[in-house]
Image: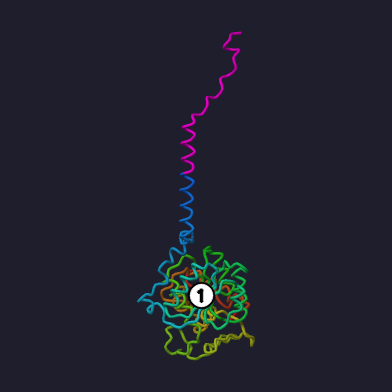
Amino acid sequence: MTNAAAEPAASTPPIDNSIATRALGAFIVQASLNQRRYAAFVRRPERRRPRIVQQLRGFGQPSSRGAAFLHNEGVKLLLVEDDRAIAESLVSGLRADGHEVAHVSTGADALAATGYDLVLLDLGLPDVDGRDVCRQLRQRGSIPIIMLTARGDEFDRVLGLELGADDYVTKPFSRRELAARIRAVGRRVQPNHDDGASSGPSNGGDELIVGPLRVDRRSRRVHLHGEELTLTAKEFDVLAYLAADPGVVFSRIEILERVWDVNWYGPTKTVDAHVAALRRKLGDHHWIEAVRGVGFRLEAPP
């Protein structure tokens, strides 16, 4: 055996002290820089806000065109939103447009609130699901409800409307879109007494009668076989529009323009969701017939 073979393997050469010192210094500098960056990040909470807040920036700035978007000035709104940043932007903008706004951040506070004409309801509340709040509010009466949520799937939209919401707005949304939705829903807080000026069909009276179905447009009450039905504001408007001309087929676009707004931004499936809810409450799907590729018509079942 040679001497080379007998010798142990060479050990790792010692680390140069100067290299170690430089590496440690660089580490300390980087750690200090990261600490300063974190401190600056914390001092700027807007950077940590969700994208919706960034898109709502400027929502609270008064707009000279606001009056053109909102014809029902002075509507008392209840805003149910747990995100403070989003709530502040919405409250500021809505007040700039002439509305009275009360803000609560929990479902319990929303259910305890009184004295409002329309509810803007977020679904992601800290204490209870917003859909449960919507259901309870609807059981109490026909106050219009607009859901504000990031849940944009069709299933969520249809479910929200089925639970009693009158409209469903997906975040992020613009100030103009929300203003149009509030105008379209909020103008139905008070009954419409100007039947003669209506651009829709009319049978010439406040009470529409289709077989055992009676729709009183002045009191906004519906009776079927003498029993009163509980409808949302939008469900009533859809039913009244169809009942004004029994047997006539109205397209989804016609219903949207009449019941919602001429500048409707959402999908036409909104009509289908409300028709489905009406069929369920009327107890017979034959009341409202779907004409494929056209729209819907109302007739008393055979």
Label 1: few (<14), some (14–19) or many (≥20) C-alpha neighbours in 10 Å: many
Image location of residue 190, percent across then percent down: 50, 86
Quadrant of residue 197 within the rendered picture: bottom left
Residue closer to the observer: 243 or 35 = 35
Magenta stretch contains residue 4 = yes
Query: At x 39% / y 72%, what residue is drawn?
Result: 61
For the C terminus, which image quadrant?
bottom right
Query: At x 47% / y 56%, what residue is drawn?
Result: 41
Residue closer to the observer: 158 or 113 = 113
Three-letter amino acid code at disc 1? Phe
Magenta stretch contains residue 52 = no
Residue 163 lies, with reference to residue 29, above or below; the image says below
Span highlighted in magenta in the image: 1-28
Image location of residue 44, percent across then percent down: 46, 60
Please name the residue that numbered disc 1 is placed on: 296
Quick check: 5 left or right of 251? right
Scheme of image coloration: rainbow
Residue closer to the observer: 46 or 26 = 26
Residue closer to the observer: 299 or 196 = 196
Query: At x 49% / y 50%, what residue is drawn?
Result: 35
Image location of residue 126, percent across then percent down: 60, 67
For the N terminus, which image quadrant?
top right
Residue 279 lies, with reference to residue 192, above or below; the image says above
Residue 167 lies, with reference to residue 72, above or below; the image says above
The outermost residue toward the bottom is 205
The outermost residue toward the left is 64
Image location of residue 40, percent across then percent down: 46, 56
Quick check: 48 left or right of 225? left
Q: Secondary structure at mark 1?
A: strand
Count up the numbered dots: 1
